[in-house]
Amino acid sequence: MTTIYLITGFLGAGKTTFLKERLLHAPVRTGVLVNDFGKVNFDGLQIKRQGMDLIELSNGSIFCSCLKDNFIEGLVELVERSLDEVYIESSGLADPSDMGKVLDSVRLRLTRGDFAFGGAICLVDALFFPKVLPKMVAVERQLRHSHLVVINKCDLVSEDQLAQVEQTIASLNPQAKILRTTYGQIDWDSMKVEIFAIADEETTNRIETRNKNLVLQLVYEPDEAVLRAFLSAIGSHFFRVKGLVRLGGQIQKVDQVNNQVQIEPYHLENSDDQPAALQEVDRLVCLTSQGLESISHLARMADQYLPGHFKLEM
């Protein structure tokens, strides 16, 4: 019997960090299905470990018709491998309102094996949650369709702010258990996800509402200060910017959300993935909902800060 867990949470909430922490203590026979909004699935490279069953679905949401069939088939494949646990890391903009229908479809297509749903776990960024909730319907849907809510980055806010975040979450989903954490660290063995019925809704992830992701390819190694200035200049036009970039002769992971830029050394868990990772170096994936306005702004800022040294992929 395979237990399936769904992990949701808005961009930058800490889903990948949370999942990496869990995988350190997960059963040997564990599978992961990673969904990334961009054309390049950097999260899959970060969590992959030796012998782990990994399926990556990129360039859209698994709850959108553009990827839903692949999502269902991926889950069927993992369950039929008779794994102990399967974790789904959804895109930050995923609306999981029809997860029940997805699981029903998986069960109908199985030719062997069986599964139980272990619950939906939603990661919340304690600092930026009050800002993104009113703007992003996906955030509210993720919360209302969760069994457990993990408030992450609690070290960045006051006790009063945390209490307000908890109150807001409880008003949206009174049944969900709420936990606090920092760096996605949870004592999983003592944590129990209480399953309760959640009625399906029609997901808001549709082809016509699909967000645009652009890839900026750097053809030279930029100065870090210049790169940070460029990222600050484009931040207001994009939900998130992330990728791998060479700085000072080393590969660095770039991650920007809510105008916060994080640049840190990039280390692979599995050295066998080195060739795949190197193919994605010097590429920044930028997610936006503003279409031509953001494309034009990205091109102008790249011309200003990185003149003549980039290629823009649509």
Image (tube, helix red, strand yellow):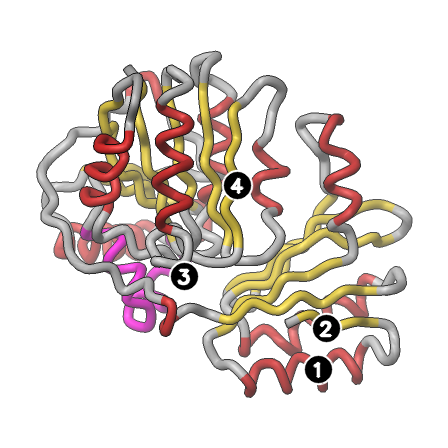
Q: CA distance from mark 2 to mark 4?
A: 24 Å
Q: CA distance from mark 3 to mark 4?
A: 27 Å
Residue 233 belongs to magenta span: no
Residue 151 or residue 292, whichever sits in front: 292
Residue at the image position 58 percent from the left and 18 percent from the top: 51
Q: Which residue is mark 3?
A: 128
Q: Which residue is mark 4?
A: 56
Q: CA distance from mark 1 to mark 2?
A: 8 Å
Callout in the foreground (1, 2): 2
| Disc on the earlier residue, 1 or 2 | 1
Left or right of 60? Residue 261 is: right
User: What's under tag 2, amino acid-wise?
Assistant: Leu
In the depicted structure, whether residue 172 falls above or below residue 313: above
User: What's under tag 1, amino acid-wise?
Assistant: Ala
Q: Which residue is mark 1?
A: 299
Label 3 crowd (10 A; few <14 / some 14-19 / many >=20): some
Residue 107 spot, x, y in % from top left: 23, 30
Q: CA distance from mark 1 to mark 4?
A: 29 Å
Residue 296 spot, x, y in % from top left: 64, 86
Left or right of 230? Residue 51 is: left
Residue at the image position 19 percent from the left and 45 percent from the top: 101
Residue at the image position 56 percent from the left and 58 percent from the top: 38
C-beta proximity under 8 Å, tags 1 and 2: yes
C-beta proximity under 8 Å, tags 3 and 2: no
User: What's under tag 4, amino acid-wise?
Assistant: Glu
Residue at the image position 60 percent from the left and 63 percent from the top: 241
Which image quadrant is residue 189 in?
top left
Label 3 sits on a secondary structure element that is loop
C-beta proximity under 8 Å, tags 3 and 4: no
Magenta-drawn stretch, dominant element (helix, strand or loop): helix
| Disc on the earlier residue, 1 or 3 | 3
